[in-house]
């Protein structure tokens, strides 16, 4: 394959538009089709594109047209499983926005359906590709701080955005906040720990956001804050601190890892802060030595989305896997386990207990 990778976007909302912005600055790729039932979303996408594309209002017709090398699935979470079933007949490459599906059972079903699939199937986990986070992972895996013992991820941010038909206000359509919003953090924990999750304990609630909203007589039921502890088989303990009524934070995400020989920490600037770069700080126990490195991201890449450049780098890796016939860096199994941890955390809060990952028969 020597020509540009031809992308079709299924789901033209916020993330579909972010993917378009990033593909537009990649020389090796182009968007050739957009599929959505919302005329406004289609219009918003067309305003981002330099070239003409084909427009579809259902994915069956798009698949029949057979004009794309790769499909991006960025539809509402609860539609993923049915859209994915319909797209499989294309045998094209698939990049599926997180969460893979809203339930563990749907993820398992999709994995069975694709056991012999010829294309690359990639679960989109943008946080893996944020430059400061990638550098932190590299240092941890290089044993710069010795053997990893503890990992903390803090996200203090704004409430859920409004989306088409406000589908993201209800757990039945999102999988719950800890699936919809936080599966990429659980994916990071597993990637960094290099181990499988053993058990999950969580505490959380809906205390501030969306309490005065109603949709068809129903009040939103999504969590807006939580603490989640995940223990891994190799003894690493991880902790998520989530608050979604903390808009004015300087850094939207902060990560801290502590090992037997020292500590490493970094952060991701919030969109509101105006800060472009992150610092990576390493403090070692031996001789009380410390270093700090600034991790910069090209301004053009930063402007192409709200995930600190990660969507751009994710597409670069996805395209490389397509061209070289490589396995995906973020597999269906990665997507499945991230959803399982999120589902375990939701169950833990509802039932007030520790949830063993063995309960999911992964």
Image (spheres, rainbow, N blue to C red):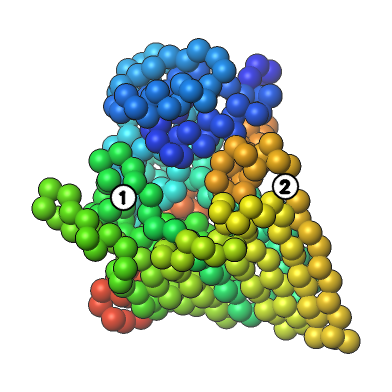
Is 141 placed above or below 126 here? Answer: below
Residue 131 image point, x, y percent: 69, 52
Q: Quadrant of the C terminus?
A: bottom left
Callout 1 environment at 10 Å: few (<14), some (14 to 19), or many (20+)?
A: many
Residue 178 image point, x, y percent: 38, 63
Q: Tell me what residue is drawn at x 49 percent, y 45 percent.
A: 123
Residue 170 image point, x, y percent: 25, 55
Q: Quadrant of residue 151?
A: bottom right
Q: Who is closer to the viewer here, 155 or 99?
A: 155
Mark 1–mark 2 distance (CA, rounded to whole Å): 30 Å
- Labels in figure, total: 2
Q: Earlier in the sequence, mark 1 or mark 2?
A: 1
Q: Tell me what residue is drawn at x 50 percent, y 57 percent.
A: 184
Dot 1 corresponds to which residue?
Answer: 168
Callout 2 environment at 10 Å: few (<14), some (14 to 19), or many (20+)?
A: some
Dot 2 corresponds to which residue?
Answer: 297
Kindly indicate whether the residue at mark 2 contacts the one at mark 1 (C-beta within 8 angstroms). no
Q: Quadrant of the N terminus?
A: top right
Is 326 placed above or below 351 here? Answer: above
Element type at marker 1?
helix
Residue 345 image point, x, y percent: 37, 70
Which label is found at residue 178? Answer: none
Q: Tell me what residue is drawn at x 71 percent, y 63 percent.
A: 136
Q: Who is closer to the viewer here, 242 or 95?
A: 242
Q: Tell me what residue is drawn at x 38 percent, y 54 percent.
A: 160
Q: Is residue 196 visible?
A: no
- Whether residue 166 sits left or right of residue 100 in the image: it is left
Element type at marker 2?
loop
- Whether residue 317 sits left or right of residue 97 in the image: it is right
Q: Is residue 12 visible?
A: yes
Q: Quadrant of residue 262?
A: bottom right
């Amino acid at each position: 394959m020597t020509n540009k990778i031809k992308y079709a976007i299924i789901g033209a909302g916020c993330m579909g538009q972010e993917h378009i912005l990033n593909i537009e600055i990649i020389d090796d790729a182009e968007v050739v089709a957009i599929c959505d039932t919302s005329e406004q979303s289609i219009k918003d996408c067309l305003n981002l594109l330099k070239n003409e594309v084909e427009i579809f209002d259902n994915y069956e017709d798009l698949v029949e047209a057979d004009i794309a090398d790769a499909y991006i699935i960025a539809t509402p979470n609860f539609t993923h499983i049915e859209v994915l079933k319909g797209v499989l007949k294309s045998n094209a490459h698939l990049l599926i926005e997180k969460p893979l599906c809203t339930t563990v059972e749907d993820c398992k079903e999709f994995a069975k359906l694709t056991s012999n699939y010829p294309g690359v199937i990639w679960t989109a986990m943008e946080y893996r590709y944020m430059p400061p986070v990638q550098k932190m992972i590299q240092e941890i895996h290089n044993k710069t701080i010795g053997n990893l013992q503890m990992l903390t991820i803090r996200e203090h941010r704004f409430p859920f955005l409004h989306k088409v038909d406000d589908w993201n206000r209800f757990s039945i359509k999102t999988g719950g906040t800890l699936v919809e919003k936080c599966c990429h953090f659980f994916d990071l924990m597993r990637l960094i720990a290099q181990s499988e999750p053993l058990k999950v304990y969580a505490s959380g609630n809906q205390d501030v956001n969306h309490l005065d909203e109603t949709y068809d007589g129903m009040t939103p039921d999504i969590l807006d804050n939580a603490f989640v502890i995940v223990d891994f088989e190799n003894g690493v303990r991880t902790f998520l601190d989530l608050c979604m009524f903390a808009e004015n934070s300087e850094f939207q995400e902060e990560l801290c890892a502590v090992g037997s020989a020292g500590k490493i920490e970094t952060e991701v600037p919030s969109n509101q802060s105006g800060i472009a770069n992150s610092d990576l700080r390493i403090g070692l126990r031996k001789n009380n030595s410390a270093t700090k490195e600034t991790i910069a991201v090209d301004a053009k890449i930063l402007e192409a989305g709200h995930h600190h450049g990660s969507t751009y780098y994710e597409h670069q890796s996805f395209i490389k896997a397509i061209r070289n016939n490589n396995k995906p860096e973020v597999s269906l199994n990665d997507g499945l386990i991230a959803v399982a941890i999120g589902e375990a955390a939701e169950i833990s809060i509802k039932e007030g207990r520790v949830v063993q990952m063995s309960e999911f028969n992964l």
